[in-house]
Amino acid sequence: MKNEFKQEYEKLRKIAEDEAAERREAAYQAEPELKRIAEERRSVIFQMGLISAASGDPAAAREKALSEIQRLNKLEEDILLKLGYEKDHLEPRYRCSMCSDTGFLGNVIQKPCSCYLKRLSARDFASSNLNSGESFENFDLNIFKDLRQRSLMKNAKALCEQYANGLPDSTETKNLLLMGKTGLGKTYLVNCIAHRAFQRNVHVIKLTGYNLIGRVLKSIREGTNIEDVMNVPVLCIDDLGTEPMMTNITREYIFSILNERLNAGLNTVVATNLSYDDILDRYEERVFSRLISLRYCKVLMLEGEDVRLSVK
Ligand SMILES: [Zn+2]
């Protein structure tokens, strides 16, 4: 996994290290013995490398050096405590104590730290244009003038909210399909779900069908993968059907994204203006079954008047 925030983490580490250097300088002024200890320890560490390479018994030499370092550490700690400092007063104070602001844990096999995943999630949320304030909290049913439509939307909202509150693990069907004509509030509901997922610290990516195929084409052109779209716990695809239909690409990628995500137990929310027949015509049976089959999917059909026309 590549570090997407390399420069930000470098900056954080530099701030922590510069700040530690200042603290050290002040402590050395107050007690020069601390500086002497630091120099001695550096020299022991340096010689440890030389000795273990040259010595007949490298393990014993290493052991001796380590115990010398421990003695110096203890000495340093006692002086710091006597001066009224914390015992780690000379160490950098990283934002994240788990990864020391590197973003990754582990030496040989590295895995992303939770602070890294949080950053990734916040970035994807921001780039999905979800900061518009469209949320379940702000959902106003009064914009639906027709009472029957209002009652349908109330149910739709409740169902979507229940689905969103179960993310990522407890939703019994992994996919949610929102169908209906333009202007019935599908995008709004998708945004509400994505927003709730983000509030609950679930990583979410939202894009349109058009953006999705754009991403696919870019990855083909650049020889990269679409790992984030495949692996993100919640993927929201709005306006499926607006993407260009390209031979050997559109159907194939949409199938493999839906299929691999289902196999991996990940949640996908899809909104479309297409009818059942349109979906079957456009994407064929295997995509259709992953979108419509009750085994995988909850289908929500929105009906009524275009609210964008009736909102004053
Ligand atoms: Zn971390």
Image (cartoon, grey):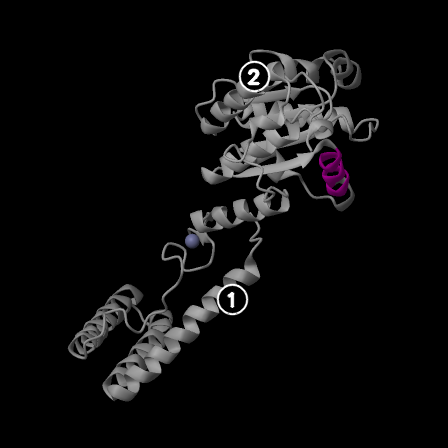
> Which numbered disc covers residue 261?
none
Work out whether residue 107 can be spotted: no
Q: Residue at coordinates 15% horizontally, 78% vertically from top-left?
A: 82
Q: Residues within 10 Å of mark 1 (few under 14, many from 20)?
A: few
Q: Quadrant of residue 261?
A: top right
**Region rendered in magenta:** 210-219
Q: Amino acid at mark 2?
A: Ser
Q: Is residue 308 left or right of residue 268?
A: right
Q: Between marks 1 and 2, how big is the CA–CA gap? A: 52 Å
Rendered location of residue 116, percent (x, y): 48, 50
Task: Determine whether the residue tagged by mark 2 lies in a helix, strand or loop.
Answer: helix
> Which numbered disc covers residue 11?
1
- The residue that disc 2 covers is 151
Task: Determine whether the residue tagged by mark 1 lies in a helix, strand or loop.
Answer: helix
Q: Quadrant of residue 307?
A: top right
What is the magenta segment's predominant secondary structure? helix
Q: Is residue 231 left or right of residue 80?
A: right
Residue 175 painted magenta: no
